[in-house]
Amino acid sequence: MCLANPEHPRIRETLSLSDYANEAHIGIVSGTGHRLLEHAVDQARIERRIVLELPRFLGLAAILLTTDLIATLPRQTGETLAAASGLKTLSCPVPVPSFTVKQHWHTRFHNDGGNIWLRGLYARLFQQPEGNESA
């Protein structure tokens, strides 16, 4: 999905492929979502104008709220950031495959109370309902 400033001067309720290609982007340059997005954009033969690269999502909402840049990121992360900061959410006009996030831990921590709590917290925050797996 894409995120933008709710007061963005050119983007309204939808984002066309040509709008997407013409806007300036923030690129999140790590993780599975980044690799899948880059591959999808390459396959669609779209050249994005990335004017800022961030290693993670930290600070992304503040930057989007104070600029006319847009960002493309996994749906669950985008919805969480948008709900917390009031950013505009838009469907990405480039189809990007979904991916599964899995938790792994050492067996010695399987019954550890703190580890159980943290795993449960992550599951509640990031688990998607059945059938809602789009990126």
Image (cartoon, helix red, strand yellow):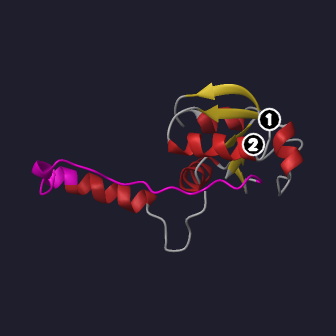
First of labels 2, 1 by sequence position: 2
- Can residue 42 be found in the magenta stretch? no
Image side of residue 114 versus residue 60, left or right: left
Please tell me which residue lies in front, 111 or 101: 101
- Mark 2 and mark 1: Cα distance apart in space: 22 Å
In percent of width and height, residue 87 lies at 68, 48
Magenta segment, prevailing SS (helix, strand or loop): loop
Q: Residue at x 70, y 38 (%)?
A: 65
Q: Which residues are magenta?
A: 93-115
Q: Which residue is mark 1?
A: 47
In percent of width and height, residue 89 lies at 70, 54
Q: Residue at x 73, y 57 (%)?
A: 91
Quadrant of residue 7 in the image?
top right
Callout 1: 10 Å neighbours few (<14), some, many (20+)? few
Quadrant of residue 33 in the image?
top right
Please state which amino acid type lies under the numbered disc 2: Asn
Helix, strand or loop at mark 2: loop
Q: Which residue is mark 2?
A: 5
Quadrant of residue 97 in the image?
bottom right
